[in-house]
Amino acid sequence: MSSQQPHAYEAFVDVATADPAVVGLVLKGSRAHEGMTTEHSDHDLYVVVADGATTDLTRFAGHRSPELDLVIVSLEEFRAAGMPGFERYALARARIVLDRLHGGIARIVATKARLDADEAFRDAGRWLDAYVNSLYRSLKNDRDGHALAARLDAADSVGLLLETLFALDRRPRPYNKYLEWELARFPLPGWDTRVLLDAADAISATGDVSAQRGLFARVEAAARRAGHGAVLDAWGEDLALMRPRRA
């Protein structure tokens, strides 16, 4: 590794490990997800520096290359990363490369992987309402002959549905790239992974009305069991359009 640019992941890890200011190294992304690495995968590495410490490694802050992307943060900043935010899932499934805090870095990562009860309830209610809104718009557009709008709203609803389901399980939603990976290893309680993924695929591709209503029936039951009946009941008579039609 040159004095100016870190050329290789392994070389940088050796240098960072030798620096007493560094209390943690955390690898995220494809390299932290078993079986997801390709020839194009780089190493996305968090370098966690003790609060108040100084290190020459800050000269590499923001470094990006086909081999290595670096994020250099203080311990306090690492605690706050993704809490909340888009980065939360990446860190929730990150791999600990160095932990000088006797498990302290691992405990911070574990905290990111699990929403607390109040946060999960609040987020699930918010995402549920957004999901119902997109679902309702899709079905209404289908009813009124607006085929493209119906499909676009249906596709939007799938992402919001996933946010809802993962929040109900007190987990951050995985990025789309890792959705199948996540569910294969950590299924959502009460859901058949293959059935859920097939429904998400069909709805995103075609906006299938029957599939949307069938899925909503299961979501409604799960949401009511989790205490979110008020969110659903606020939709009043509009729920009839979203529920499965009797034969």
Image (cartoon, helix red, strand yellow):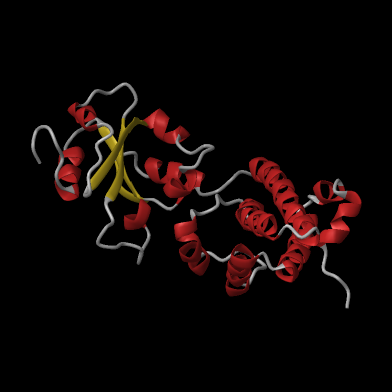
Judge from the rendering whether residue 228 lies leftward or rightward of residue 124; answer left or right.
right
Q: Position of residue 47 (x, y in %)?
A: 29, 37
- Residue farthest toward the left in the current orientation of the protein: 2
- Residue farthest toward the right in the current orientation of the protein: 237
Residue 197, quarter of picture:
bottom right
Residue in the image at 27% along x and 50% along y: 43
Q: Position of residue 215 (x, y in %)?
A: 72, 66
185 vs 81: above or below: below
Residue 19, quarter of picture:
top left
170 vs 71: above or below: below
Judge from the rendering whether residue 102 lies leftward or rightward of residue 222; answer left or right.
left
Q: Which quarter of the image is occupied by the C terminus?
A: bottom right
Residue in the image at 85% along x and 56% along y: 239
Residue in the image at 28% along x and 34% along y: 62
Of the pair 100 and 226, the residue shown nearer to us: 226
Of the pair 51 and 130, the residue shown nearer to us: 130
Q: Where is residue 57 in the image (x, y as percent from the top left)?
A: 20, 31
Of the pair 150 and 35, the residue shown nearer to us: 150
Residue in the image at 77% along x and 54% along y: 136
55 vs 209: above or below: above
Judge from the rendering whether residue 115 lies leftward or rightward of residue 145; answer left or right.
left
Q: Which quarter of the image is occupied by the N terminus?
A: top left
Q: Position of residue 211 (x, y in %)?
A: 71, 70
Judge from the rendering whether residue 193 lies leftward or rightward of residue 176; answer left or right.
right
